[in-house]
Image: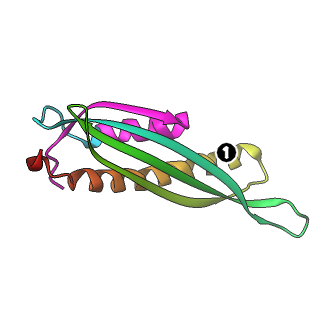
Amino acid sequence: NSQNFSINALETEGDKKIGFLIKNKLLIKTKQNSENEININIIANKNKTIKEKNTKNEITKYLITVNLDIKVEKNNKILKEFKVSNQSDFNVSAQYSQTIVNENETITLITDSLISKITRELTLINFNDL
């Protein structure tokens, strides 16, 4: 995974928790002090929907979908715009606190997958064409 860029600025909008996780993980994964400094803007949207109910009409499973709109710039010129998304489900627990833990673990798994997709897209940018 050869990265020929570093992130100068990384702005996130939308879902604050997803934005925070993506921003921190992306900054850790990229190297510093490259001649190709890029600015990234990410708009994060999270959608939680009911996936399953039991015979008593109680919710037993939720589906979380995370969509990211990403814009990459260098010297105020747009290099690339792309979207990545991922989804996963989690079970509702008898205890509400465990349901929250399940949801947070699912969000972490989704963001880890999205980071891989983002870094793959970023490494495809040909800085020699600029």
- Disc 1 on helix, strand or loop? helix
In the picture as drawn, the residue positioned furthest to the bottom comes out as 55
Location of residue 88 (image quadrant): bottom right
Up/down of 40 relative to 95, above or below: above
Q: Nearer the viewer, residue 121 or 53?
A: 121
Residue 123 belongs to magenta span = no
Q: Nearer the viewer, residue 40 or 79?
A: 79
For image coordinates 49% across by 54% down, the residue present is: 110
Residue 21 drawn at (x, y percent): 45, 39
Location of residue 73 (image quadrant): top left
For image coordinates 62% across by 61% down, the residue present is: 89
**Residue ID for mark 1:** 100
Residue 69 drawn at (x, y percent): 44, 47
For this view, does 46 lie left or right of residue 126?
right
Question: Which kind of residue does numbered mark 1 sit on?
Answer: Ile
In the picture as drawn, the residue positioned furthest to the right comes out as 56
Up/down of 23 relative to 110, above or below: above
* Magenta extent: 1-27
For image coordinates 53% across by 33% down, the residue present is: 16
Residue 84 drawn at (x, y percent): 43, 55
Q: Quadrant of the C terminus?
A: top left
Q: Residues within 10 Å of mark 1 (few under 14, many from 20)?
A: some
In the picture as drawn, the residue positioned furthest to the front comes out as 77
